[in-house]
Image: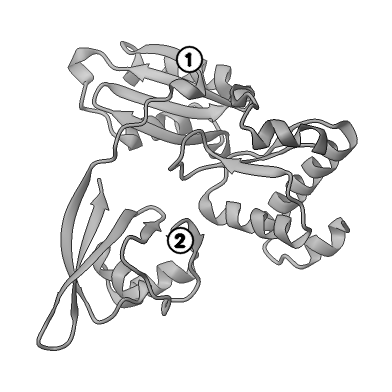
Amino acid sequence: MNKQEILNKITNEEDKLLVSKMLDKIEFTTKRNSVEYTDFLDMRQRQLLEKVLNDIKFTNYIALGGYKMAERTVIVIYPEKLEEIFKQNRFDYNTVFGVIRIILPNELKGMYAHRNYLSGIIKIGIKREKVGDILTRFDGADIIVLKDAEKYVLEGLKELTRFSKAEFVTVKISDLKVEEPKTEKINVIVPSMRIDSIVSEAIRTSRAKATEIIKEEKVFINHELVIKGAKEVKTNDLITVRGKGRFKVGEILNSTKKGNLVIEIEKYV
């Protein structure tokens, strides 16, 4: 593995730094026989790193975020001597992840959304890459963090006025409360099954704006980055638009007299 050759192929400086850090972790793992892991990655960053791993034919890694449908994940890199432990799912991921559970007082139950917890994290000065998904509920939330940041995040959140009456506990990643996501079904009319058409209607914006969002690398189909607006989508595809939400493509219900398609979309709320 020639680190410099790999980095020379990357033009974006932030991406170059991200890849460089991962390559260093691979080197640490190889030399020290240690388990290493990245910070939390968004879907674009994860795809970038997995492409590099594929290019260099490195397979001793696993990407996960604490539960099956996690949007934000880490890449855990492990030495060959631990390969069977990981393949048999016997590694203790509590050494990677921490979970901070916030239980709201009765008067605040149902009042806080994802943004209330995220803005609190930002306010105490925690870098976003140290925090994974935030799973909100009627009575509070489970916040997934890197284990080495758990104590700092916990103490910081306790100091915030908005959580002054809340109860805090830390739990194991296996005790994470994952509720079935709430969805609502909407019907959209599109000229075709192209991703730019679907995104335009799903987030209620113009086709030109949808194309711009795709070019900004904010759109994913089944967690894979989309770079062309002409990409066709299929029934049951999961579409994620960063900052706008997630949508599942349903059946084609009908067609209009003008030949447009009426599609059912399930929107995660």
Comparing labels 1 and 2, the label whose residue is closer to the camera: 1
The quadrant in which residue 158 appears is: top left
The residue carrying mark 2 is: 218
User: Between marks 1 and 2, how big is the CA–CA gap?
Assistant: 32 Å
Quick one: label 1 or label 2, which is nearer the N terminus? Answer: 1
- Which label belongs to residue 6? none
- Which label belongs to residue 170? 1
The quadrant in which residue 61 appears is: top right
Disc 1 residue type (three-letter): Thr
Q: Residue at x 86, y 39 (%)?
A: 30
Disc 2 residue type (three-letter): Lys
Q: Residue at x 31, y 32 (%)?
A: 179
Near mark 2 (Cα within 10 A), the count class, few <14, some 14-19 or many ≥20, is some
Residue 14 in sight here:
yes
Element assignment for label 2: loop
Q: Nearer the viewer, residue 79 or 38?
A: 79
